[in-house]
Image: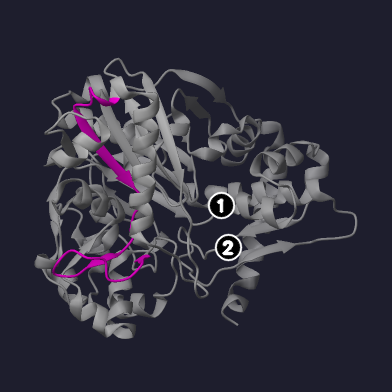
C-alpha cells in the first residue's frame, strides 16, 4: 500500500494506492488563499499542516487497515511557492504562492543580472517563480530576508514536518529559477544573483528516490508502520504525468486545475524561453518535459460561478452546455487573465475581460464565454510546445465535465483521453513515486490507466472555433497596453 499526498492551492488531497493499482481511498481538505493586496497570493503553512491532520484523520477513520499497511509515501504539490524559515526552521512569513504577481520588477533585475538565465534555468524570469520572490523580500522585507536560513517549496515544507529532513526533488526545484535544469543541480550563479547560497537550499534527490523517513511519533498518531520511506516526489504536474503513465517522450496531458497546463514529456532538456515555455526536469531520472501554463483555468470557472450567481461550477457548465453551436458565435469573448498570465504572454499585468456584451446576452452566454476563453488560452499554450504524439490525457478537477472535455478537444483539435483516476492528478502520481522509492519498476508502476472515455475533435466546428480564437488573440493584443494603465 502506498500513500500519495498532493498539496494543491485549493485543497490537500491524500490517496491510498494498492499494489494492484486500485485506489483504495481518497481524502480531501480545503485550503484558502489570502490576497491582502492586489497581485498578492499567500497561504500560511500552518493551514497546510491542519489540512494534513484532517486528511490523515479521515483516512484512519475510513481505511485504517490500508493505512497500517503503507510502505512508502510520495509528495506532490503546487510549485514555486516560497516558504521562508529561520535558523530554528520556524516560518517567518506567509508563503508567497505560484500565482503571486508582485515581483515583476525583480524579474527584470534577475534577467539583467544573469543574461544566461534562460540557458541555465530553461525558463524566463516570471513573477510566479521562487527566485524573484526572494528578491522582493530582500527589497521590501529586509529583516525577514536577513533572518532567512532556509527556503523550501510547499510540499517540501510538509516533508520537513513529516521527517525533519530538508529535501527537494528535481522537478519541483526546476520551478525556482535556482536550478541548472540541464545539469540537475543547484546553480551557484543563480543563487548568488538573489543573495543566497547552497546553504539556503534543501538537498536534491530524484522524484523516485527515497528522501527521508517518517517520524515515529506521527506513525503512532495515524496508525502507520514505523520507518516508512518518503519519496522525493514531484511538482504537481510532473506527478500528474507519473500518475497517468506519461513518462515516454511525446506523451502528455492537459490539466484543468486551478491553473491550466499542457505538459509534454521529453528525453532531453529543450528550453524555449522566448515563448514562455517551461522546460523542467521530469520526476524520473534522465528525463525532462516542456510545459505551458495559464494561471486561471478551473479557477476562472469558479470565479465566474460565484460572481454571476451560478452557485457552483457544475451549474455554470450545465448552463454553458445549453448554448447551441450557432448561438456560441454570438457569445461574448472572455480573456481569462484574472491573475495575469504566463504562457505564452509572460504578462503579470494581464487582466480578465468580458468583451462584446449586449442586452441580448443571457447567463448561458456568459457561462459559455468563460469556458471557451479558458480553452482558447490552452490552445495558445499548445502552439508553443513540441507537438505531442497521439492523444493528450485529461486530468484535474475540470476533467470531470464531459461537455468541457469535448469542447476542449474541438478547440485544441487534439484527441483527449480520460482514464481511470484522471481526477486524482498529482496524488496518484505521488503514491506511484512512493512505490518507485520502495523498489517498484517503472514499467510496472507507471502504466497507463484504463481508458474511461475518449474525446475526438468535431472538425465541423473547426472554422467557427478558429475564427473566434482569432478574435480572442486580437483582443488581447489590442488591450495589452491598457492593462498597466
Q: Does 246 sit left or right of 296 as displayed?
A: left
Q: Most prominent secondary structure in the magenta stretch?
A: loop
The residue shown at (58%, 35%) is 409
What x and y, as percent, mark residue 350?
55, 69
Outermost top residue: 20
Q: Does 311 sit left or right of 425 as displayed?
A: right
Q: Pick the quarter of the image with the C terminus.
A: bottom right
Is there any visible trace of residue 245 in the rendered image? no
What x and y, as percent, mark residue 237?
36, 44
Q: How far is the residue under mark 1 from the one under mark 2?
A: 9 Å
Q: Pick the quarter of the image with the N terminus.
A: top left
The residue shown at (80%, 49%) is 363
Viewer-closest of 367 and 199: 199
| Mark 2 surroundings: few (<14), some (14-19) or many (≥20) residues within 10 A | some
Identify whether 398 is placed above or below 446: below
Is there any visible trace of residue 148 in the rendered image? yes
- In the picture of the structure, the residue carrying the numbered disc 1 is 299
- In the picture of the structure, the residue carrying the numbered disc 2 is 338
Amino acid at each position: 500500500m502506498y500513500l500519495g499526498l498532493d498539496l494543491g492551492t485549493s485543497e490537500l488531497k491524500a490517496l491510498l494506492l494498492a499494489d494492484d493499482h486500485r485506489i483504495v481511498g481518497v481524502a480531501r481538505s480545503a485550503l484558502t488563499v489570502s490576497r491582502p493586496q492586489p497581485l498578492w497570493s499567500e497561504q500560511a503553512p500552518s493551514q497546510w499542516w491542519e489540512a494534513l491532520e484532517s486528511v490523515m484523520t479521515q483516512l484512519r477513520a475510513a481505511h485504517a487497515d490500508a493505512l497500517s499497511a503503507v510502505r512508502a509515501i510520495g509528495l506532490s504539490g503546487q510549485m514555486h511557492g516560497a516558504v521562508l524559515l529561520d535558523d530554528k526552521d520556524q516560518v517567518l512569513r506567509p508563503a508567497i504562492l505560484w500565482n503571486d504577481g508582485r515581483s515583476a520588477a525583480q524579474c527584470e533585475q534577475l534577467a539583467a543580472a544573469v543574461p544566461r538565465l534562460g540557458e541555465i534555468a530553461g525558463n524566463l524570469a516570471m513573477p510566479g517563480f521562487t527566485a524573484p520572490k526572494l528578491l522582493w523580500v530582500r527589497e521590501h522585507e529586509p529583516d525577514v530576508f536577513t533572518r532567512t536560513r532556509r527556503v523550501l517549496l510547499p510540499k517540501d515544507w510538509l516533508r520537513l514536518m513529516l521527517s525533519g529532513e530538508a529535501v527537494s526533488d528535481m522537478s519541483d526545484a526546476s520551478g525556482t529559477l535556482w536550478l541548472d535544469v540541464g545539469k540537475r543541480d543547484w546553480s551557484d550563479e543563480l543563487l548568488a544573483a538573489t543573495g543566497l547560497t547552497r546553504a539556503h537550499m534543501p538537498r536534491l534527490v530524484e522524484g523516485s528516490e527515497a528522501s527521508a523517513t517518517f517520524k515515529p511519533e506521527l506513525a503512532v498518531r495515524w496508525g502507520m508502520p514505523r520507518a516508512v520511506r518518503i519519496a522525493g516526489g514531484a511538482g504537481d504536474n510532473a506527478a500528474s504525468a507519473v500518475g497517468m503513465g506519461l513518462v515516454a517522450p511525446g506523451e502528455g496531458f492537459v490539466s484543468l486545475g486551478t491553473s491550466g497546463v499542457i505538459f509534454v514529456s521529453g528525453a532531453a532538456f529543450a528550453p524555449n524561453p522566448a515563448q514562455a515555455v517551461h522546460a523542467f526536469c521530469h520526476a524520473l531520472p534522465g528525463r525532462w518535459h516542456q510545459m505551458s501554463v495559464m494561471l486561471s483555468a478551473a479557477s476562472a470557472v469558479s470565479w465566474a460561478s460565484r460572481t454571476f450567481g451560478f452557485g457552483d461550477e457544475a451549474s455554470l457548465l450545465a448552463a454553458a452546455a445549453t448554448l447551441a453551436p450557432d448561438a456560441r458565435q454570438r457569445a461574448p469573448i472572455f480573456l481569462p487573465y484574472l491573475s495575469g498570465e504566463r504562457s505564452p504572454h509572460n504578462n503579470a499585468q494581464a487582466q480578465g475581460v468580458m468583451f462584446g456584451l449586449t442586452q441580448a446576452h443571457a447567463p448561458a452566454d456568459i457561462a459559455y464565454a468563460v469556458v471557451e476563453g479558458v480553452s482558447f488560452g490552452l490552445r495558445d499554450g499548445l502552439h508553443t510546445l513540441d507537438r505531442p504524439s497521439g492523444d493528450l490525457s485529461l486530468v484535474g478537477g475540470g476533467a470531470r465535465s464531459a461537455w468541457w472535455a469535448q469542447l476542449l478537444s474541438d478547440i485544441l483539435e487534439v484527441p483527449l483521453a480520460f482514464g481511470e483516476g484522471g481526477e486524482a492528478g498529482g496524488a496518484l502520481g505521488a503514491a506511484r513515486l512512493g512505490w518507485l522509492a520502495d523498489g517498484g519498476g517503472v514499467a510496472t508502476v507507471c502504466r497507463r490507466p484504463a481508458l474511461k472515455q475518449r474525446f475526438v475533435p468535431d472538425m465541423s466546428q473547426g472554422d467557427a472555433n478558429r475564427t473566434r480564437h482569432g478574435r480572442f488573440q486580437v483582443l488581447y493584443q489590442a488591450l495589452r497596453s491598457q492593462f498597466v494603465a
